[in-house]
Structure formats: structure tokens, C-alpha cells
Amino acid sequence: MDVIDRILIDQAAIESRVKELGAQISQEYAGKTITLVCILKGGLMFLCDLAKHITVPVMYDFMSVSSYGDSTQSSGVVRITKDLEHSIEGKDVIIVEDIIDTGLTLSYLLNNLLSRNPASLKICTLLDKPDNRKVEIPVDYVGFTVPNEFLVGYGLDYQQLYRNYPYIFVLNKKYYTNNAE
Ligand code: PRP
């Protein structure tokens, strides 16, 4: 399909890295119960696969945020469109994200969630795109460090499509130059 420029991370590589992350988290949280906070919608696929490889007790909760302003550029001004259902006070929380790009979304979320007094708060992202960072983020678990390209699949969308693809691909440039979001 010509929407795909090239596959950056194939299904087998994702599966094996997610399994490793699950094992690492299980080891580090031995004896604890983890609250995984999934940031919708991009984090959903990663959450489901990661949770299968965590062997300590796990609870889920979900948050949805949107940035104000231009949809293709993070503005840093974030609005919560769906909040957590449960208190995280005293809980061991891991935020599960598909990608950290500028870091602006997570910077807001970190401050917001820290103010709710969790016992601990860590970040697990499948993809880290450090070249585009505008604010420093203490990332605890990273699946893959990726180049500054338009990535789609495995949770990441282009105009809300392709999130269900089991691999991560670079979007063909003709889509975002001629047909910008
Ligand atoms: C993506 C991603 C992160 C954020 C990262 O979400 O899931 O939440 O952007 O970008 P940043 O580091 O530059 O702030 P998006 O707003 O595209 O929503 P989605 O998860 O519903 O696709």
C-alpha cells in the first residue's frame, strides 16, 4: 500500500521488545500491584500487549487528553477529555504511552498525576523520539528510540487510521505534504 514508505519496526520486533519490557517491569515491581494508566488512544494497543507479559497484579485506568491549537503540532496546552475513574493516591502507577515526541503532553500529565499523590509514578513508552523534544522527560521504560519521521501503526494514527496495524511504518511523504491534517 503506498501509504507506507517503509516498515520501521516489524511485528516480531515489537512482540519481542514488549515481552522484555513486561519481564523487566514484573521483576522491578515484585510484590506490588501496578496501576497502568493508558493514555488514549495511541497507548491502547501497547497497554494490551504489555499487560499480557506482566506477572504481578495489574489494574488499568484510562485517560484521554487533547492539545489545544494546531492538530499537527503539540502546543503544550493540554486539556483532559477523559479523566481516570479511580484515585491513584498511594498506588504504584506506570503511564503507558505509544510515543513521546516533544514531551509536552507527558510533562503536563506528570505534573497532573503527581499532584494526586501516587506512591510512585513511572513512564513506559513504546517509542521515544528524542530529536524533537522540547521539554525534558524522565522516561523509565523505552521500547525503541526512533528517528524524527512521521510514524504510523501499532496505536499511532494518520487521520485516525492505521492504529490497528501490527507494525510501525514511516508514512509516505506524499500524504502529509499534500494532505496535511
Ligand atoms: C500522541 C501520543 C502522545 C503525544 C506525544 O497523542 O500518544 O500522547 O501525541 O506527543 P508530544 O510528546 O509531542 O506531546 P495524540 O495527541 O496524537 O493522540 P492519540 O494518542 O489519540 O493519537
Image (cartoon, grey):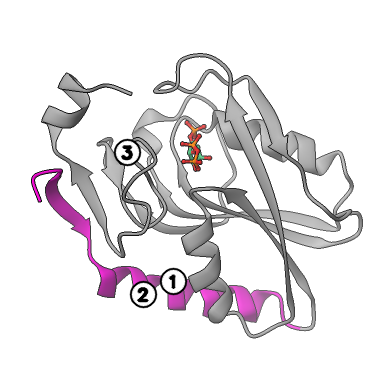
Q: CA distance from mark 2 to mark 3?
A: 22 Å
Residue 18: mark: 1
Q: Is mark 2 within 8 Å of ligand 1?
A: no
Q: Residue at x 10, y 51 (%)?
A: 1
Q: Which residue is mark 2?
A: 15
**In what quadrant of the picture does the C terminus appear?**
top left
Chain-order first, disc 1 or disc 3: 1
The residue range painted magenta reads 1-30
Q: Position of residue 117 (x, y in %)?
A: 89, 48
Q: Position of residue 106 (x, y in %)?
A: 60, 37
Query: Contact, CB < 8 Å: mark 1 with mark 2?
Result: yes
Q: Nearer the viewer, mark 2 or mark 3?
A: 3
Q: Secondary structure at mark 3?
A: loop
Residue 165 falls in which quadrant of the image? Answer: bottom left
Q: Residue at x 69, y 53 (%)?
A: 62
Q: Secondary structure at mark 1?
A: helix
Q: Which residue is mark 3?
A: 158
Q: Residue at x 63, y 81 (%)?
A: 27
Residue 104 falls in which quadrant of the image? Answer: top right
- For the residue pair 27 and 55, the one nearer the viewer reads as 55
Q: CA distance from mark 1 to mark 2?
A: 5 Å
72 inside magenta stretch: no
Q: CA distance from mark 1 to mark 3?
A: 23 Å
Q: Is residue 167 left or right of residue 154?
A: left
Q: Is mark 1 within 8 Å of ligand 1?
A: no
Amino acid on which disc 3 is placed: Tyr
